[in-house]
Image: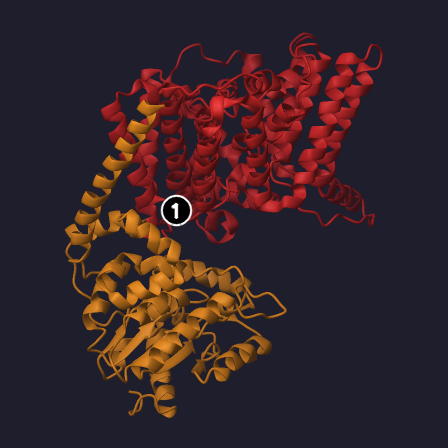
Amino acid sequence: MLFNSLAFLIFFPTVFILYWSIPNNKIKTQNVLLLIASYVFYGWWDWRFLSLIAFSTVVDYFVGLQIANAKNNRKRWLLVSVFVNLGLLATFKYFNFFIESWIELWSLIGLETHVGTLNIVLPVGISFYTFQTMSYSIDIYRKELQPTKDFIAFSTFVSFFPQLVAGPIERASNLIPQLLTKREWKHENFKNGFFQICIGFFRKVVVADSIGALIDGVYNEPGIHNSTTIGLAVFLYSFQIYFDFSGYSDIAIGTAKLLGFQFKRNFNLPYFSTSITEFWRRWHISLSSWLRDYLYIPLGGNRNGTVMLYRNLFLTMLLGGLWHGSSWNFVIWGMFHGILLAIERGFGLIPKKYNLFNNLLTFFLVTLIWVFFRALDFGDTKIIFQKLFTGPYRELYIGDIGLLVSTFYGLTLALLFDLYLFRKGLFLEDLGNRIKNVAFVFAISFIVLNIILFYSSASNFIYFQF
Amino acid sequence: MKKSILLFFGTLLTFLIFDRIVTMVISNAEKKIYIESSIGKVNQFIKVKDSVDVLVLGSSRALHHVDTRNFGKAAFNIGADGKKVAYCAALSSMLQKEGQIVLVHVDHNRVFDKDYDGRDGRGLLYKAESNENLSEFYKAKFPTEYFISKGVHSYPYNGKALIILKNFMVKDSVNQSGYEPIFPTEVQKAVFANMFKEEKSQMNIGITKPLSISNEFEKYVDYIQETAVANGSKLVFFTSPSLSKVDGEVHDKVGKFFENRGILYLDHLDYFENQDLTLWKDYTHLSAKGANLYTGFLLAQLAEHGVLSYPAH
């Protein structure tokens, strides 16, 4: 089910009313309801893949208990969890990629190999829930977390619908305790959550989807467009992916708040970063912190000298790139980020204070690297860079003028709002409650009216494919 | 919780008041627009639909390919960018004039587009309040959207508000025929010439086999035919020339589809056999020169089939 669908607009209020109607907010009953709702939410897309979530849930629930109870075989049980979760990912997400790369590798030296690929659909959100369950087992292994014996609570943790298909990747240490304690209705949660959901919808359906409608044609056929049009598409894609993904996170975090849960912040105005290092502290925070805690630090982090530090940064970002998708373009995207992180660290290029020049330079670099992320393949990436750097810059191709005007209107509003948050040092997560009731009523009315007048037709969230 | 419920309903009430005020402003401005863009053209269409003898409906290919000034009768071209058969059906629901000639442009790939959901048909929802037949059309074909528009009045103006306000303030001349010729710029000519060097023509773009007629397409063609029968109109579906070609199987299947319904269908996709680039803006759109030549041929064909009683100019 998509957040930006009529089905969700009926689904969520129904769940919300049932959830808060349960007498005495009984935890067990509420968790059962959330579990059923989460499976309905996911099954709406394809019910067959519910079995994968259920499988991953059962394995990690059992493994978690075994790790905590075992005296000698703790590592072996941990490997079961890692093997199962990475195995699911390898099969459903990377199998064909590895096979095709293997064939291409041999073809480079003139040898022809025949290995069959699988005709499989990538299950939505698999990268998110496998990382979430894996971190649960790792935390127990590290003795940073006690396993839960409550199977319903654990299953709800794995499949909780606000964050199931595109994150944020919630840690068990944050979510499971909340699932085991009584949720109380709080007016401030209502204001914060409601406000964040509205902002999320605006970011997604007004800004990101309009940009998508405008630039998809350019990215799908870069060969027929001139340098000016490609330049604009590259510039706008930076905002499309930001508002698409942060919009999704806002709806997820806000929805969870309305149900009495607190998720961690996932975006913190990343385009105001003055270095790539800072960018990764502000962008997709739940993934970057996951990679830091479960990959970068286990690899050695910065503990084994400068060369190893660079290697670890590079490897972490490379694998982070591959996490996003089974294509060499994602690997290269991650690789560039890894190189830039290493350069910043090596040459001490991370500013201590905000300055506009570094902000613009960082944005420029991030924007260029996004090309690898969005281009359909490496061939298109080459065409785009060739046109960007060689020109000639001729007249801009404008498809639908109405769409262009609406897009820039929405983008301007969204950027001004971000600028306001940045200048005032505010966080969206607790902004709703800071606004007085009368202003709140007018602000929400204004946002919703703009959503209705300027939303672009429904399209998938970009991060669904990961 | 009471505080939150109160705030929620307060917000809802304020939003509904906002919604009514904004819709009133936009709707009043919209009614006064008769210039370019789909909004102004629709108003022009509503103004002339019961007086003209010929109407041309369809996408940008209808808009740019049929020069209604050459018809010798009162004619109006209501073709618009991105519009497909559902939009044509919505337009046809408003027609009342007896004996009118209704030409509907159709592209071969649209006939077989399994993903087509008739979304373009929602484009006239904002006019449903002012036309009873159109209102019935939306009740029957788009009940959810119709229902939402009853509660949230601004909903039908999605994507139109800024264009309405801009056109309300900018005065421009009214286009009486609806037809919009294309005069390619030098850059467009050069770009297309380059593309054409690589690929002389395209084949079966957007068509997957085995061929299967889209249910939505069928549904709206039936609706247009029912309306034409009720009005005693002469209904003709046609496909204008394109460099994006289809194979014989596609031609046959589309031809049979209309033949089985007793609808006259003129398939002119391959009319321009020579590859004179001055006739084209791109693979699917004719230049003004190409449109002028094609309109002459279309008129002759209509005369030959007894739709028009006079030969082409």
Residue visible at 32% across and 80% down in the picture = B230
Q: Is residue B77 above or below residue A351?
A: below
Q: Quadrant of residue B248?
A: bottom right
Residue visible at 69% across and 37% down in the picture = A52
Can residue B82 be seen? no
Percent position of residue A83, x then y: 77, 28
Colour assignment, chain B: orange
Q: Quadrant of the N terminus of chain B?
A: top left
Q: Quadrant of residue A98?
A: top right
Q: Is residue B290 above or below residue A358?
A: below
Crowding around mark 1 (Cα neighbors within 10 Å: few <14, some 14 to 19, many 20+) is many
Q: Chain of mark 1?
A: A
Q: Nearer the viewer, residue A327 or A44?
A: A44
Percent position of residue B227, x then y: 34, 76
Callout 1 secondary element: loop
Which residue is at the far front?
A: A23
The chain assigned the colour red in the figure is A
Q: Is residue A302 above or below residue A41?
A: above
Identify the residue position indicated by label 1 in the image. A456
Percent position of residue B290, x then y: 37, 74
Which residue is at the far right?
A: A72
A66 vs A384, left or right, is right
Colouring mode (rainbow / by chain / secondary structure / one colour): by chain
Can residue A322 be seen? yes
A374 vs B121, left or right, is right
Percent position of residue A185, x then y: 42, 21
Q: Quadrant of the C terminus of chain B?
A: bottom left
Q: Amino acid at mark 1?
A: Ser
A277 vs B79, left or right, is right
